[in-house]
Amino acid sequence: MKKLAILYSNYTPTIDAIIGRLKENCEIVCFDKDSDELKTFDLIVDVNFGYSGSLNILKVHHSLLPAFFTNEPVKQAIIAGVKVTGLTFYYTNPHRIIAQYPVFIPNEAHFDDVEQELLYLEQTLYPLIIEKILKNEVIDIKTLIKSQSKCNGCSGGNCSGC
C-alpha cells in the first residue's frame, strides 16, 4: 500500500477531498510541521503549508507558472490585466511542472470570484492528480475533468447543457 503525507498549516476542504478520494487505496498521514518521518512516504503533498526544505514535494499554485509565482497570484494576474490564469501542479525539487489547467478571467471579474473557482478546481483536480501519480499513470487533465463531469457527452457538438 502506498503512503501519502499531507503537509498543511490550516485546514482546507482540499484535505478532505484528498483523503476522501484516496483513503481506500493508500495510507494517509497529515503533518502540520516538518518531520524526518516525511522521508518514508511515497508522495508528499503540500496543501497550504509552504514547505521550503529539500524534499521533493507536490504542490499546486493558483497561476499558470511560470507567470505570477507570488503569494498573491490571482490578485497580481487581475492587476496585470491577463485574461487566463489557472492551476499549476508541480514538484519542488527539482522544480518540475507536471500538469496545468487554465481558467479564463471574465472582464468584470472580482478577485474573490476567481479565487473561489480556483479553490473549487483545486479540490476537484488535486486528489485526481495525486491518485494518478501514486498509480504511476499518465496525467491527462481533459480526461480527469471528463471523469468527474456529469455531462452525457452530447453528440455532434450540440451541448444539451447537462
Image: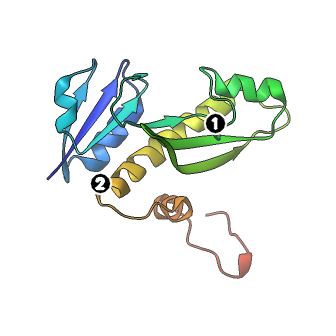
Q: Which residue is mark 2?
A: 134
Residue type at mark 1 is Ser
The residue lying furthest to the bottom in this view is 156
Which percent across, then down, holds residue 161? 67, 63
Which percent across, then down, holds residue 89? 50, 43
Asked whether, in this view, residue 119 is left or right of residue 36, the answer is: right
**Label 2, label 1: how many angstroms apart (C-alpha)?**
24 Å
Asked whether, in this view, residue 49 is left or right of residue 27, the answer is: right
Query: Would you identify the image quadrant in which residue 87 lies?
Result: top right
First in sequence, mark 2 or 1: give its number: 1
- Circle 1 crowding by C-alpha within 10 Å: few under 14, some 14–19, many from 20: many
Asked whether, in this view, residue 162 is left or right of residue 78, the answer is: left
Q: Which is nearer the eye, 11 or 2?
A: 2
- Circle 2 crowding by C-alpha within 10 Å: few under 14, some 14–19, many from 20: some
Q: Which residue is mark 1?
A: 63
Which percent across, then down, holds residue 55? 33, 32
Q: Residue at x 84, y 31 (%)?
A: 81
